[in-house]
Amino acid sequence: MSDKLRWGVLGTARIVRKTIPALQATKNGEVVAIASRTQEKATEYAHKHGLPQAFGSYESLLAAPDIDAVYLALPNALHLEWILKSLDAGKHVLCEKPLAMSAAECGEIARKADETGLKVLEGFMYRFHPRFEKLQELLAANVVGTLTFVHVAHSFDAGGDDNIRWYTRLGGGALFDTGCYCVNMSRMVTAQEPAHIAAFGNYRDANDGGRIDTSMAGILRFPGGATALFDTGVNLERRNYLEITGTEGRLYLGNPLGLLEEDSVLEEHHFGQDTIHHKIKGENHFVRMGEHFADSVLNGRPLRYDLTDAANNAQVLEALDRAARKPEAV
């Protein structure tokens, strides 16, 4: 293997407009290829991003000997199939969230990763930003006292009826697209797994039959006594914030999933005292995630988040989906 991780990109979803430039900007990686279902689309994206190779099928990219790892940007329901195929082809995998559609699928991926000795990471990029490192530092210092409430919101408008989020066979819906961030963030902040779960969803007809969630509100009750409340949607105004409240104070972070190169502010509040503004220098969390992954592969270091974490997140998502789809759901 070279001194840089050689990336191939599976898929041409909108997210690659952010992730390809980020992977190209890493110190220890380079993007050398992209694959789509058609040669025309692959060539278009390769030209747009200055990539030397374009493949008209995912299989052909996986067969290329000069690719060490793949960044997988396919619809949610296709993750399991193409992660397993990538591992069988000897490629490490950085996969867009959620890693898979169930804890059982995550377990299947973990077994294949163990069998092949290859790295797999679920791509929750926000966890690599310095603002979340500062947030965890403040929580470890107990600045909010006993953690009581976590509030998370993440929503945006997905747009037209042809969007992949309106197809059940592609793993669409709000919970698995945007709600997965809310669950992951709540679990990270509390450093626990929820003991009790409740959820309420709003639904529409899916494009391929059945009903699919457009928005959802959820409650996670953790063993230590903290409660996380979240709401999420893919047909709503763009919203994105995290608030953590305890017996001694409150932390607030606006736009925790955005603000790349821009500086951000983590607010610390204590019962009417002057607000403490922790100013966080802007950094691209996609770049940091890519560098962490490449360092793990190239230097044999462990990943910061393992596949047990991905399975635990999927298990919570499954439970929320079941709870929200009870007969009284609207």
Image (cartoon, rainbow, N blue to C red):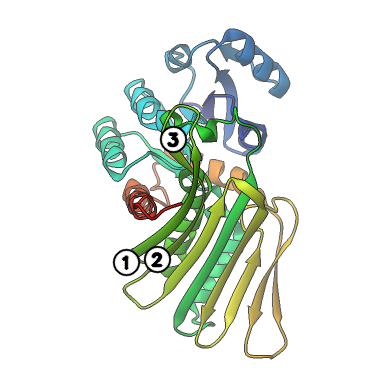
Residue sitting at 51 percent across and 31 percent down? 71
Amino acid type at circle 3 is Gly
Element class at badge 1: strand
Task: Answer whether residue 86 is visible to the viewer in this image.
Answer: yes
Residue sitting at 62 percent across and 87 percent down? 270
Q: Nearer the viewer, residue 320 or 138?
A: 320
Q: Residues within 10 Å of mark 2 (few under 14, many from 20)?
A: many
Q: Residue beneath label 1, please?
A: 196
Q: Which mark is residue 220?
A: 2
The picture places residue 241, in percent across and down from the top left corner, at: 62, 62
Amino acid type at circle 1 is His
Q: Are marks 2 and 1 in contact (CB under 8 Å)?
A: yes
How far apart are labels 2 and 1 at the CA level?
A: 6 Å
Is residue 287 found left or right of 177 in the rendered image?
right
The picture places residue 204, in percent across and down from the top left corner, at: 51, 41
Is residue 55 found left or right of 1 in the rendered image?
right
Q: Sequence-wise, which precedes: disc 2 or disc 1? A: 1
How far apart are labels 2 and 3 at the CA level?
A: 22 Å
Q: Residues within 10 Å of mark 1 (few under 14, many from 20)?
A: few
Element class at badge 3: loop
